[in-house]
Image (cartoon, rainbow, N blue to C red):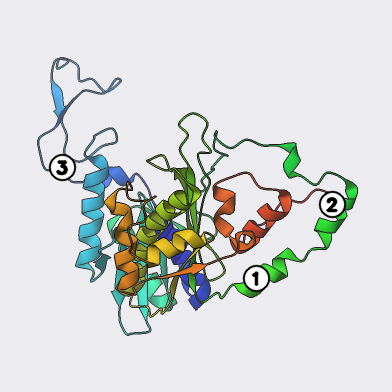
Amino acid sequence: MTSIRFALSLIAKYDLEVEQLHVKDAFLNGELEENIYMYQPEGYVVSGKENMVCKLQRSVYGLKQAPRQWYKRFDSFMLHHGFERILIDHCVYMKRKTAAEFIVLLLYVNDMLIMGKNANEIRNLKIKLNESFEMKDLGKAEHILAISCPLGTQFKMSTHLSPKNKAEQQVMEKIPYAPAIRSLIKEEDLVAYTDSDLRGDAGSIKSTFGYLFTYAGGAISWQSKLQKCIALSTTEAEYIVVTECFKEMLWLKRFFEELGLSHQKFIVQCDSQNAIHLCKNPSLHSRLKHIHLRYHWVREVLKEKVLQLEKVHTEDNGASMLTKVLPRSKHDTCCVIADLDTATSE
């Protein structure tokens, strides 16, 4: 999903053409590599041969091999037509004609997006796909892979987060959150926000961490989950989430590189000055000497100047909405940073 959201941000930034297609009965296209037998299907039993079984000639739905065999068939098709697999995501294929002209196909099971500058190149690829597979042409991409994500069970809603009276509501309505936050964001930068609560999950007393990546004016990657270990302090919890965020940022950086796109700044923002200090200063602090060595990997990344780690004010941290329930005004600020629409009530 992150690859698709990242591709959509590139489409918006570079004004690319984008088409959507659907492969009908995709798993039936797979070619089997071993002998597989099945009982005669109900309603199609051959009279006098009831005890015999069928030998499959091709893949069918229900086989554990079906998804893999479909992918191998499609992968062979793309490579045959001059496309290259993106190494960091084998469901993304690219064909470059010049430095400025390329075509990219993204596959998600049996749904695909094709994007590029040249509409004729996209049209030619669609023709070739139709010659080999039974396709449904959905035209210009408008809607793909709708996914619903309900609020996590560890988050507790509370009325004290809302304005208490009409006067407070009127004050909040006058604060220009959207213009203020938008003025701080440079659309050309790939920016990540990190945040963590402290032992917010009552059952496991583990902390919930979250990160949010924005590019070209919108969110392209985000995550909210419990940390694997119990953090003993806010600084420790924030230090751990920076490591998780760095891993995702490096993946996106390599995505840029494989697509041949030049990008200078890869910025991770954290609202904990203590965590930033520990990331940039490789001293063994007495309160962090118990932390697993894997979390100290961020220091090596910063030392090599691969990524940038900066301080962000807590009020401007877009990842806050992924770790805790917020007052309405702060939640709206996070939505503005992620370029999300907020529902308003009259």
Question: Which of the image's four quarters has the N terminus?
Answer: bottom left
Residue at point 55% right, 74% down? 187
| Cα distance between the residues tagged 2 and 1 | 22 Å
Which of the two discs, 2 and 1, sits closer to the camera? Answer: 2
Residue 282, above or below 239: below
Q: Which mark is residue 32?
A: 3
**Which residue carries the number 1 mark?**
182
Mark 1 residue crowding within 10 angstroms, few (<14) / some (14–19) / many (20+)? some
Residue at point 33% right, 85% down? 99
| Cα distance between the residues tagged 2 and 3 | 64 Å
Q: Position of residue 148 (x, y in %)?
A: 54, 43
| Cα distance between the residues tagged 3 and 1 | 53 Å
Q: Considering the numbered disc 1 on the image, is that residue within a helix, a strand or a loop? A: helix
Q: Position of residue 177 (x, y in %)?
A: 72, 64
**Which residue carries the number 2 mark?**
169
Q: Considering the numbered disc 3 on the image, is that residue within a helix, a strand or a loop? A: loop
Q: Position of residue 322 (x, y in %)?
A: 55, 49
